[in-house]
Image (cartoon, rainbow, N blue to C red):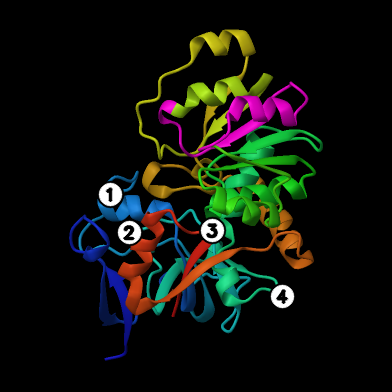
Amino acid sequence: MDTAKVVRFHQSGGPEVLQVEDLPRPEPKVGEVRIKVQAIGLNRAEVLFRSGTYFEQPQFPSLIGVEASGIVDALGPGVNGIKIGDKISVATGQSMGRYGIYGESVLVPAGYAIPYPSNLTPVEAASVWVQYLTAWFAFTDVANLQAGQHVLITAATGGAGLGAIQIAKALGALTIATTRAASKKRALLDAGADHVIVTSTEDLPARVKEITGGKGADLIFDPVAGKTLSTLAEAVAWGGNIILYGALGGLDVPYPISAGFARNFGLRTYLVYNFCGLPTLGLPRNEAAFGRAVKFIKTNLASGKLKPIIAMTFPLAKIQDAHRYMESDEQLGKIVVTV
């Protein structure tokens, strides 16, 4: 029997539940393609899915993963525009349980298999879509970010934060990145941030106002939420916007109503799947918005304006170690598993 190594888990829990198993190589059905995986980009959503705290609940034994690069080696019926041998990267939007991509040979919906520019390596191509799509839709379709505006990007050292810095710069905005670790300040500046605030030693609202000439940030892009929202409310410009795209600080988020009245800011919760779709939530893909995003991102990847920053790579056999490292919050950039 033709088999391939695939990561599955049989119960929710920590990284130790992830198991590398030999399974029959899957055959694509209608609208699917099979890819020989070369690299896998890790995302925080997979930690939540593995632990049973994500929007989608695993059905055991469960696959896992949303982002990869590889070579198409089989086509299902009805697939057009993709051919065997194409080098593709997998965009987010598919069910993680059904189309998990941690493995040597996996199936993906054809609409999420996107040929990538030839100047990217497979490791870089596995690190594209989650970080850049997340920032693109938030900045363009939600906030209408304009050239010359200031955007504050909190918790900026992860893949999403670094991707947001690059997307904002490509749109002509001015970026202010935050980190708790002074040791990461230089790396964030090297990654393109115009300014960096070390929140463990600096007063965030005061520094933002200093940088912006007293105005505050036109847009704040935040994955933390929790009790930090009151601090962000003091740093946003009058009439500006705060977009919460995560809740790393917890789901208990007190609303700073006094600052809300005084600063007239807009507060938005945002999920990238409202644009790229997620069947398990009943969300269809916004094809027009998705098409605009893919065109912009591919063009800027090809020109070098967008370039994924890789923190560390692990082999597939070390998938548990890769998840432990992701949960350590020590990385600067994307964690990638090579296959």
Q: Nearer the viewer, mark 1 or mark 3?
A: 3
Q: Confirm or deny contact between disc 1 and disc 2 (CB under 8 A).
A: yes
Quarter that holds the C terminus: bottom left
* Vertical side of 67 occupied by 182: above or below: above
Q: Which residues are magenta?
A: 200-227
Q: What label sits on residue 119 in the rendered view?
A: 4
Q: Position of residue 78 (x, y in %)?
A: 52, 69
At 34% from the left and 71% from the top, the residue drawn is 319
Q: Amino acid at mark 1?
A: Gln
Q: Amino acid at mark 2?
A: Gly
CA–CA distance in space, label 1 to label 3:
29 Å
Q: Amino acid at mark 3?
A: Leu
- Residue 176 appears in view: yes
Q: Check disc 1 and report the residue beneath it.
A: 57
Q: What label sits on residue 332 in the rendered view?
A: 3
Q: Nearer the viewer, mark 3 or mark 4?
A: 3
First in residue order: circle 1 vs circle 3 = 1
Q: Report whether 120 appears left or right of 321.
A: right
CA–CA distance in space, label 1 to label 2:
8 Å
Residue 250: name its quadrant.
top left
First in residue order: circle 2 vs circle 4 = 2
Identify the secondary structure beneath mark 1.
loop
Q: Nearer the viewer, mark 2 or mark 4?
A: 4
Q: Give whichever of 171, 277 is nearer the camera.
A: 171
Identify the secondary structure beneath mark 3.
loop
Identify the secondary structure beneath mark 2.
loop
Q: Check disc 2 and report the residue beneath it.
A: 97
